[in-house]
Amino acid sequence: GISEGAELLPDVVSAMSSVSGVVMVSASGLDPAVAGALQAERMGHSAAWQALRSMQASDSADDVLVQGRSLGYWRAFWHWPLTASLLSAPWPLLRIWGDADESVPLAAYLQFTPQASNRKLPFCDIRLPGADHALQTAQRDGIQWLWSQLERWARQPEKGMCEVVGSK
């Protein structure tokens, strides 16, 4: 799952019969409302975030538009249990992210890390120094690097995802 798409991973994967591992690209792993609050704070928009929080908790109809999305969307967003789903998931989890990401704050990535390190199954955390939200730097295409690592793992599936991806 890439960015917001990673929020769907636990539900999508639960419908599959066999999963060897799940990869999150540029996604913190925190519940969307928690990561959103950290981003709003980083951008100096905490008051607007609090107003949105109040609106989604109001009695207004779901079809009312706020910040370009329906209140129904915001209500689902506010109560999406991503972190708990990822922490209890029955598959290895790889998260790759850039520490120069402007869309997801560094604090969100760092907040999830200690929680995920207590998972029963492996958690591989790959931080790409200087990479942006698209995992790009002036010297490296992080997405292409990731695909090459996943291909290495596919050629030796008997080894664990974390053991292969990112190793030299």
Image (tube, rainbow, N blue to C red):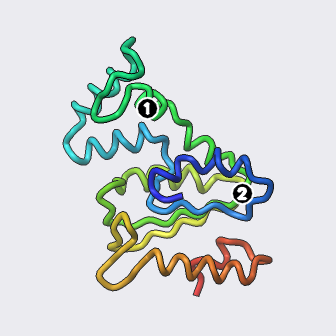
Pointer 2 residue: 91
As rendered, which of 46 and 155 lies closer to the eye?
155
Residue hosting label 1: 73
Q: Residue at x 59, y 66 (%)?
A: 124
Residue 120 versus residue 73 in the image, above or below: below
Instruction: Please say if 59 is above or below 143.
Output: above
- Residue at the image position 52 percent from the left and 47 percent from the top: 7
Q: Residue at x 40, y 44 (%)?
A: 35
Residue 36 falls in which quadrant of the image?
top left
Q: As shown in the figure, which amino acid type bears the numbered disc 2? A: Trp
Q: Quadrant of the C terminus?
A: bottom right
Say which label, 2 or 1, has the lower sequence index.
1
Task: Give how far across and how far down residue 112 sits, in percent.
Answer: 50, 51
Residue 150 on image: x %, y %: 61, 76
Query: Mark 1 packing: few (<14 Cα in 10 Å), some, or many (20+)?
Result: some
Q: CA distance from mark 2 to mark 1?
A: 28 Å
What is the count of numbered marks? 2
> In terms of depth relative to the viewer, which is nearer, 141 or 65?
65
Q: Amino acid at mark 1?
A: Tyr
Residue 145 lies left or right of residue 49; in this view the side is: right
Q: Residue at x 50, y 69 (%)?
A: 126
